[in-house]
Image (cartoon, grey):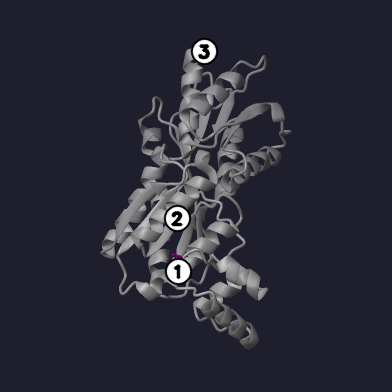
Amino acid sequence: MQDNAQPAVTISAIASAAGVSVPTVSRVLNGRSDVAPATRERVELLLREYGYRRRGAVQAAPSGLVDLVFNDLDSPWAVEIIRGVEESLNAEGMSVVVSAIHRRGGADSTRKWLDTLGARTSDGAILVTTDLDSFLHAELQRLNLPVVVVDPAGVPDLEVPTIGATNWTGAVTATEHLTQQNHRRIAFVAGRPGLWCSRARLDGYRAGLDAAGIAFDPALVISGDFDYASGFAAGAELLALPDRPTAIFAASDQMALGVYEAARQQGLRIPDDLSVVGFDDLPEAGWASPPLTTVRQPLSEMGSLAARTLVRLIRGETVESPRIELSTRLVQRASVHALGS
């Protein structure tokens, strides 16, 4: 027997039938005034004909539960985000469920999470380093689930608030710090290709070189995956060059610590033989030997702001700024040595 509630009906199907965009259907569902009366009438008619049921129509009261979703949970970086989210939600009397949509699982992993989410009746979701495509956005809208994206994978073109950091500015500052210490041969261990933050940090590195009159050398750039192993591999390759770099800027602290180990295995001392700068300012950066100079990305604050923004959406309040970037800053420690000094 077929379910009369037609759980498979999605907002994207309604939008297609009405000849409008998914955001337009979303605005109708949310009672927004910026929809033409004829369009609103057509969409509302189709919603009734399709038997579309808003998740909120069957949920009598908020559950006090929020989903926090990562692509992977294999980095101390995630812990800082979780800390900020949990502290803000706890202050509101709400709880958080942490899960992962594994990159290697593809669409199947996303669908499994959506099925679990529908059964759990969360009040909202915070997605981290996620590419919020039209399918995922439509399914979250079908569940009537507010969403905020932290450190989005790409530039969102949907009506979803995003929280990020000034990645480009941070990378410029790190590179300029090295050039001001008389380094000219500066390598860069880039982040995962395709991510917005990776592109921004690479662009910032190039801009920092340009500001110092240093030509960009693609042979000095190797892509990693933000983890220790890829930083070690990239560091070993860069330090094996006939004319090795005198400094390496890594797009994450984990990769910078991998560079530390690559240098150690080649008998190089930091900072005497090689200067290193990271990005994130994880607790491990201060514990390293020597302590790592790095760009502080306010991860806990990003998580906290995402949680507070989501709470406002859950309460039906307006969010004035759809895109917020928190400031980064350079934290100078002992891993950089001035050439000629």
Residue 2 magenta-highlighted: yes
Which quadrant holds residue 208?
Answer: top right
Q: Is residue 278 left or right of residue 312?
A: right
Residue 168 in percent (x, y) is at 59, 47
Check if residue 303 falls in the magenta segment: no
Question: For mark 1, what is the residue?
Answer: 144
Q: Which residues are magenta?
A: 1-5
For the C terminus, the quadrant is top right
Name the residue located 51 percent from the left edge and 23 percent from the top edge: 232
- Given the image, on which type of amino acid does mark 1 rest? Asn
Estimate how packed mark 3 is, as few (under 14), some (14 to 19) or many (20 or more) residues with alpha carbons within 10 Å. few
On the question of residue 269 being in view, the answer is no
Compared to residue 2, the image places residue 219 above or below, namely above
The residues bearing labels 2 and 3 have C-alpha atoms spaced at a distance of: 47 Å
Q: Which amino acid, mark 3?
A: Gln
Q: Residues within 10 Å of mark 1 (few under 14, many from 20)?
A: many
In front of the other: 255 or 154: 154
Residue 266: which numbered mark, if any? 3
Task: Measuring from the top left, give residue 339's x and y in whole percent.
Answer: 58, 24
- Which residue occupies 47% across, 16% down? 264
- Left or right? Give the position of 327 relative to 85: right
Q: Is residue 240 visible?
A: yes
Give neighbour class at mark 2: few <14, some 14-19, many 20+ (Cα, 10 Å). Answer: some
Residue extending farthest to the bottom is 37
Separation of residues labelled 1 and 3 (CA atoms)? 55 Å
Which residue does the image show at 30% across and 66% down from the upper left? Answer: 63
Which residue in the protein does label 2 denote? 114
